């Protein structure tokens, strides 16, 4: 990148979001972090980004609230001279069969996983158009491409997020703005680590056995996708060679989708 860009990654105090923040800082972007965590974690994340030689700030917006999303976008534009790279990464996940699924959890998942990207994009696009350049990356999932049981909120919102991506991509197709979706397979983030530890306890297995059983019914590679590799793919889309990729839903999944 030639001039300094401003990047916002939602839900970026750990996991794929923080890996992405570091990758975009590596491209020279000033970074805005967001998400829920204690003050010590926020400070440690900011320090790690600043050590890469860029500016870093944190905004505590609760993405369930459109007014807080509006402040997240406008304050980022003011603090970092615009918003050039938008990564919609934050997520909530609940588990359960549709007939037992709590309506309030459904509403929250729609708000965070789908409506928040709609709001961030609608608010960021005018500034990107005025500058004549922008990159939007929506973190969907392999579960945006096919379904599984007991995850009605996740499957529905990730599938719709790919539709949102395609619709936005067509609207910006004649500009230097792109909008793509990433569809990771299973990445060993804290959320997945927690699930494996639950399964260890339930089944009385070691972590390695739980990991093997978890991957055996998912990824033909039999290994987790690395969060740094997801971040690297996002950085590629935001770099100079990403310009002609628009409206894609890109799997990064150890051949999981290939076998469906
Ligand atoms: P994570 O659970 O570690 O992080 C989610 C983040 O979202 C957290 O920082 C949390 O604070 C934030 N968040 C939740 N509700 C929020 C709200 N109301 N307002 C603001 N922030 C909020 O996530 P992860 O596992 O790193 O996944 C990141 C993205 O990648 C998600 O979109 C997820 O669906 C996708 N993904 C992950 C995997 C995986 O295996 N981990 C696989 C496929 C797709």
Image: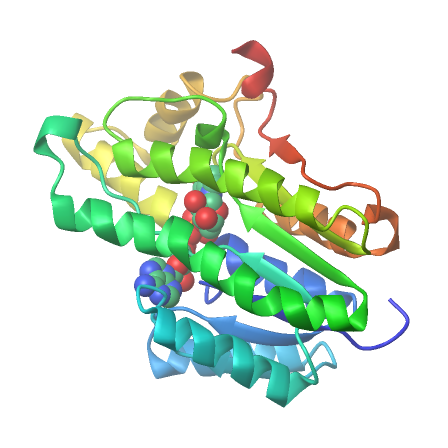
Residue 117: x percent and y percent? 48, 56
Residue 108: x percent and y percent? 25, 53
Q: Is residue 22 above or below residue 5?
A: above
Asked if residue 258 shows in the view, the reply is yes
Residue 133: x percent and y percent? 79, 64
Please give the name of the residue rendered at 55% of the width and 10% of the height, measured from the top-left corner: 259
- Residue farthest toward the right in the current orientation of the protein: 2
Identify which residue, 45 or 145, lies in the foreground: 145
Please give the name of the residue rendered at 62% of the width and 51% of the height, measured from the top-left corner: 137
Q: Is residue 116 above or below residue 84?
A: above
Identify which residue, 12 or 152, lies in the foreground: 152
Asked if residue 225 shows in the view, the reply is no
Please give the name of the residue rendered at 53% of the width and 75% of the height, measured from the top-left corner: 73
Please give the name of the residue rendered at 68% of the width and 79% of the height, measured from the top-left corner: 82
Question: Would you say 122 lies left or right of 155 here?
Answer: right
Residue 121: x percent and y percent? 56, 60
């Amino acid at each position: 990148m030639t001039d300094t860009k401003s990047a916002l990654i939602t839900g970026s105090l750990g996991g794929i979001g923080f890996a992405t923040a570091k990758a975009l800082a590596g491209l020279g972007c000033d970074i805005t972090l967001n998400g829920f965590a204690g003050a010590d974690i926020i400070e440690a994340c900011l320090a790690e980004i600043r050590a890469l030689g860029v500016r870093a700030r944190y905004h505590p917006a609760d993405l369930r609230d459109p007014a807080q999303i509006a402040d997240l976008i406008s304050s980022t534009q003011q603090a970092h001279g615009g918003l050039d790279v938008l990564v919609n990464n934050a997520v909530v996940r609940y588990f359960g069969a549709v007939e037992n699924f709590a309506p309030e959890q459904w509403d929250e998942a729609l708000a965070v996983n789908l409506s928040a990207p709609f709001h961030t994009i609608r608010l960021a696009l005018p500034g990107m158009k005025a500058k004549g350049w922008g990159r939007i990356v929506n973190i969907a999932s392999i579960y945006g491409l096919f379904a599984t049981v007991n995850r009605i909120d996740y499957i529905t919102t990730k599938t719709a997020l790919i539709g949102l991506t395609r619709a936005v991509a067509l609207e910006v197709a004649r500009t230097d703005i792109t909008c793509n979706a990433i569809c990771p397979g299973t990445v060993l983030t804290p959320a997945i680590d927690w699930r494996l530890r639950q399964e260890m306890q339930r089944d009385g297995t070691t972590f390695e056995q739980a990991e093997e059983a978890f991957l055996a019914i998912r990824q033909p590679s039999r290994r987790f996708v690395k969060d740094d590799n997801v971040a690297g793919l996002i950085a590629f889309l935001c770099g100079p060679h990403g310009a002609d990729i628009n409206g894609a839903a890109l799997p990064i999944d150890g051949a999981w989708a290939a076998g469906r």
